[in-house]
Image (cartoon, rainbow, N blue to C red):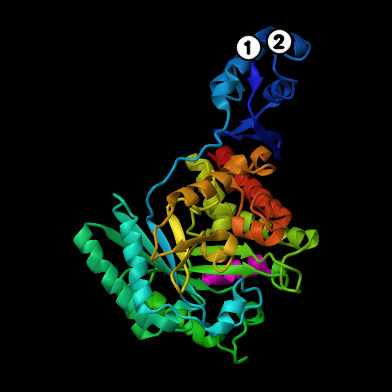
Amino acid sequence: MIYLTELHKQPFKDCTLILNVQSLDVFLFSNIMMSIIELDFPLKENDIINKLADKYSKEDLLNAIKELLESEILIKNKALHQHSSKTNKSDFLNKIDLYISSDCQLKCKYCFDRDSALKRQNMTLQTAKDSIDFLFKNSGESTNLHVCFFGGEPTIKHEIISQTIRYANQKALAGNKYIHYSITTNGLNLKDDVLDLIVSHKINTVISIDGDEITQMYNRPGKDNQNYYKELISNITNAQQKGVNISARATISKNSKNRVFENFIFLENLGFNEIHMEPAFGNTNGIFIDSIEDVESIKLELGKIEDYVKNKITSNENRSSFQLLTEPLSIILNKTKLTHSCHIAANYVAIDWDGSIYLCHRMISNDKYYLGKISSDFDFNKLHNYRQILNVNNRAKCSICWVRNICGGGCVAVCEEYNGNTDDHHPLDCLLHKHSISLALDIIANHMVNN
């Protein structure tokens, strides 16, 4: 008996693009191939030939069936192609986010931690050192560790960051380990002292900038309502001149949904080689993406970026990495199937200013995802249980979706904020994921045709 594997189909020019959902292989099919896979399977080989005998010769059908079996579009052993809902148990950590400060100079309208920002809570040096001890204690045989400084605005306490790095590097040297550092910042404190710290320790730097001045000042106003934009651009330019590895983290709001392409080009011209743009989802307050109309506007903008990227590829020109397209492109081309959208509940935790441990930085202060304190024993079983629950193949609606192995189920923090649980998806986020993945497939197909 012959079975049909799980497929996604979308039109491309005068043929049909096929994605093997399990293997992530991409094909462009002609009429005979499409005629076969549109039959109702399972079928025997003779059944396929008999059903299509009036349209194609037996020889052509046999050749097509052989090709489809070789490419695993058609399969003979269905059990070998079932997806796994099991997650390998992890008993070590290699990455932590340190919530250095909840204080910030900005009052971003979509900030997911605005309440903490009002309290101005700061991590002490001792808690930061204890967090490093916690990471090393639980890192097992892992030799490559990662520490991310987060907030709020972490550079407000850059002296804490500096002393924490010095302490961590001493432990790494003694333990024959290496630590990679990263930071997410609004860019306002990127003066010489902070830049020297970043350069000397090769800290990967993500700057929160949504685009041009109009977009930035609307989405991310300053607490004092002063226009800081020229200072921000000056800081970015200075950082680039010093050789800082910086990328842009841009948030798409309801206000900027029709200017996504324009802001992408602006950020590229500003010198960012990596541009990460994400819609702001949340409760309706006039800033969040909260309607089908919003999604349709963003889809039109993504289409413009797709055309731009395709033209750059065709002309072999340098271009910025646009995460909404390059991430699915990389996953599909490298066949790196995702069971989760990120490293959540794998070898990573987030640590709040007081040493409390949470599942991720966006879940800090949510008691449902509290995992304990750095000063007490850490329960890896609890972390593994979350990893199992959040496996995309264990989430009811996600487990039957064609994009699951590419998106990994989407951001679980967004799901939690929208649904009050992590099992269901955010419908608008899901629509945008599917659209961006379809655009990525279109780019792949275009490259296949041109080469």
Rendered location of residue 338, percent (x, y): 53, 44
Rendered location of residue 36, percent (x, y): 70, 20
Rendered location of residue 383, percent (x, y): 48, 51
- Label 2 with label 1: CB-CB less than 8 Å: yes
Is residue 55 visible in the rendered structure shown here? yes
Q: CA distance from mark 2 to mark 1?
A: 8 Å
Q: Which residue is mark 1?
A: 62
Question: Which amino acid type is shown beneath numbered disc 1?
Answer: Leu
Does residue 71 lie above or below 423 as drawn? above
**Of callouts 2 and 1, the N-terminal one:** 2
Tell me the residue at 67%/48% (across/down): 434
> Magenta stretch mostly in which secondary structure?
helix
Q: Quadrant of residue 283?
A: bottom right
Give 114 or 375, whichever is nearer the viewer.
375
Give 412 or 326, whichever is nearer the viewer.
412
Q: Which residue is mark 2?
A: 49
Does residue 261 lie above or below 219 as drawn? above
Question: Which amino acid type is shown beneath numbered disc 2?
Answer: Ile
Report the side of 417 relative to 351 (left or right).
Answer: right
Is residue 243 visible in the rendered structure shown here? no
Tell me the residue at 65%/81% (across/down): 214
Neighbor class of circle 2 (other Cα within 10 Å; few <14, some 14-19, many 20+) is: many
Q: What element does badge 1 sit on? A: helix
- Residue 268 falls inside the magenta stretch: yes
Which span is picked out in magenta? 259-270
Does residue 228 lie above or below 404 as drawn? below
